Image: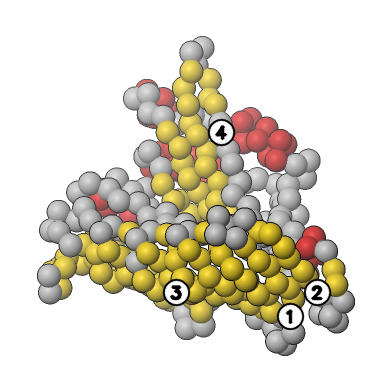
Amino acid sequence: MKKLTFILFIAIAKMGFAQQDTTLIYNSPMYTKDPIRSKWKPVVKQVGQLYQVTFYDRKDVTQEVISFEDKDLTVRKGPYLRYQKGILKEQGTYDKGHKNGEWTTYNSDGKTPKKVGNFAHGKLDGKYVEYWNGNKEEGNYLNGLKTGIWKFTYKDGKPAGNETYDDMGKKIEGSYYSKEGAPVKYEDLFAPPSYEGGLKEFYKYLATEVKYPAQSLKQKIEGTVKLSFVVKKNGSIENVEILSAPNNELANEAIRVLALAPDWTPGKMFGEVMETRYAIPVKFSLKK
């Protein structure tokens, strides 16, 4: 008898989650293999020496603009733009298929930066700044690892803490302060969202609720669906996004079950309850 096996991992770090290049590069035509982009209308045009693909939803609203160095659309190069509900959400530049240079993610107004990071061929490298409801985290990355002194500042400019990292990205010391300037523990300011009963119970929920899609089962399609989602202040889940998936059917099933999951306990940043985004892989595996 075949059964479904899940391997799940919640990527949690004190400042959101690990920063990395999650870009997906598909063979041509890449948009027919991506579960999200396959639903959008692509328009391809040559811009200088690059080939630019603009994706539109069913209402002809721009969703994404990707530039490629080749007409087969296999290697990303040049400007990139991502929109959400018609508002600019992210922009940056690719080189040789990887994020390179400065990348900016915007708040819901499409103008105010949420985070600004510098990349060197897919890895964070250089100055990094992220804002949390007016509070700020800033420091430097080296080859994808935090390095040197990182500072946390409250929205009124008062220090919330300092951390020091060695060249291997290991935190060697840290000090944290309340809004009144008193020394506090890290846990007093930063806490990730939690699921009632812990992650073990969350795994059980997924294992009991997910139904292996019929067509994928028939074709013996296996693989990992990588999703990200936001845990809101009220503990509900929204803005579930596909980072990668073997096909649309497995992706849609993972999204369906995740979206129906019971509420989480929201996390906090700088001592405040805030929305937090997570990344989670769900592995679909058929075993006899």
Q: Are marks 4 and 2 in contact (CB under 8 Å)?
A: no
* Residue at the limit of the structure toward the front, as seen here: 167
**Which residue shows up at 28% across the image and 71% down it?**
79
Nearer to us: label 4 or label 1: 1
The residue that mark 4 highlights is 7
Closer to the N terminus: mark 3 or mark 4? 4
Nearer to us: label 3 or label 1: 1
Q: Are marks 1 and 2 in contact (CB under 8 Å)?
A: yes
* Residue at the limit of the structure toward the bottom, as seen here: 156
Q: Marks 1 and 2, Cα distance to the nearest angstrom? A: 7 Å
Q: Marks 4 and 1, Cα distance to the nearest angstrom? A: 40 Å
Closer to the N terminus: mark 3 or mark 2? 3
The residue that mark 2 highlights is 177
For this view, does 219 lie left or right of residue 89? Answer: left
Q: Marks 4 and 2, Cα distance to the nearest angstrom? A: 38 Å
What colour scheme has been applied to the protein in the rendered image? Answer: secondary structure
Query: Residue type at mark 1?
Result: Pro
How many C-alpha atoms fall within 10 Å of the one at disc 4: few (<14), some, or many (≥20)? few
Closer to the N terminus: mark 1 or mark 2? 1
How many C-alpha atoms fall within 10 Å of the one at disc 2: few (<14), some, or many (≥20)? many
Closer to the N terminus: mark 4 or mark 2? 4
Nearer to us: label 3 or label 2: 2
